[in-house]
Amino acid sequence: MTRAVLEIRTSPHIVSGNSVVSIMFNVVLALIPVSVFAVYAFGFTALATLATALASCVATEHLLCRTASKDTTVGDWSAVITGLLYGLTLPPGLPLWMVAAGGFIAIAVGKYLFGGLGYNVFNPALVGRAILQATFPVPMTTWVDAFRPDRFTTIVSSSLTPPLSRPQPIADVVSGATPLSAWKFDEELARAGDLVMGYTSGSTGETCAVLILIGGAWLVARKMMNWRIPAAIFATVIAFSGVFWLIDSQTYPSPVFMLFSGGLMLGAVFMATDMVGSPMTGLGCVIYGAAIGALIVVIRLWGSMPEGVMYAILLGNALSPHIDAMLRPRVYGTRPESAPKADRGKEAT
């Protein structure tokens, strides 16, 4: 006679079958077209930037795990995603030693300090970039022209600046302003087609918006991304900026410009949607995305800096747990905590 074994487990009892490794690997696949186009646009300089960012993030995670006498977690692809996203937020031509330092900060401070994968409050890639922005503001706002004729034969000299040395402002590095800074300080608007296809200067990831959206659609189709977050960001940016554009189109840029300029597409699709840093409920994701979209418009229109995606997402990450607390679903079979005390007394008697 065989005995039946009764297994008692906690919820969830129904799972999708997608493991952490599977989800992370698919995100890497979704980022490959964006990364390839970045190399196509900026050449070997972008390739060196992305490779250094990726290597520094992966190496930092491996070394920290070994230092803590734990099995290495680089096989879950999360450090690879952080490295790619972090590299895509950087300007091509940034000294490689700064890229490596930021990669260490992204993993050590943005991820490992909070307890590792699943515990980080803020997006690690943006933590690394934010600290670099505050520490090295000039190199972080020095841009390289896209589609330079010699981009596949040379690397701009600023990338090879020795550690702890200040990169010299030489001719092969300094280029025209990014679309956002050109609008903010020179009142010049880039063409919509150039913005959509990525034919502009800027960070390595300010590339083809079409490829970014294709990568996001791939993840949404595989149910590995909450579509409500980027949709809420896009809708809020269009509506909020559109109001001011209709009021004064000479002063404020069009919603199309706001949507496709800068790092909004990359941030909305691949960074704001971080499962750890975003809310858990559908309504919470909409509120979270709307808050990020509103912050982006406010910073761009009235802030001292032309770009606000990084700060908007980090502030959204800080807001996320409060959104979850406010929208906490009621447990089935219980009464709301806000029930009048008099009614509770009657129930007790």
Image (cartoon, rainbow, N blue to C red):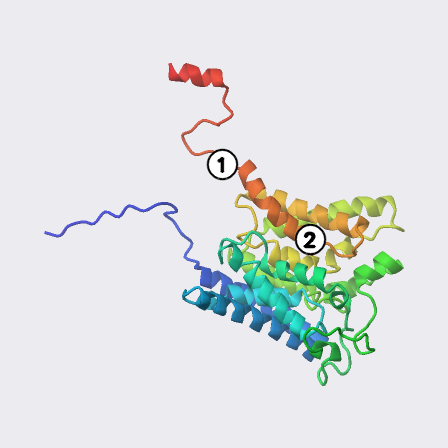
Q: Residue at x 84, y 50 (%)?
A: 252
| Residue type highlighted by circle 1 | Pro
Front residue of this view, candidates 222 and 201: 201
Residue 233 in percent (x, y) is at 67, 49
Q: Is residue 53 left or right of residue 136?
A: left
Q: Nearer the viewer, mark 1 or mark 2?
A: 2
State the quadrant of the C terminus. Answer: top left
First of labels 1, 2 by sequence position: 2
Compare residues 281 and 322 and report the one nearer the observer.
322
Q: Position of residue 178 (x, y in %)?
A: 79, 64
Please tell me which residue lies in front, 209 or 180.
180
Marks 1 and 2, how far apart in space?
A: 29 Å
Which of the numbered marks, if any, corresponds to residue 122?
Answer: none
Q: Please provide percent x and percent y for residue 185.
A: 86, 58
| Relative to 310, residue 160 above or below | below
Residue 96 visible somewhere in the drawing: yes
Mark 2 secondary-structure assignment: helix
Q: Amino acid at mark 2?
A: Tyr
Q: Which residue is mark 2?
A: 311
Residue receiving disc 1: 329
Residue beneath the point at 77% across and 82% down: 149
Question: How many other residues sit within 10 Å of disc 1, few (<14), some (14-19) or many (≥20)?
Answer: few
Q: Is residue 241 above or below residue 214?
A: above
Asked if 341 appears above or below 221 in the picture, the reply is above
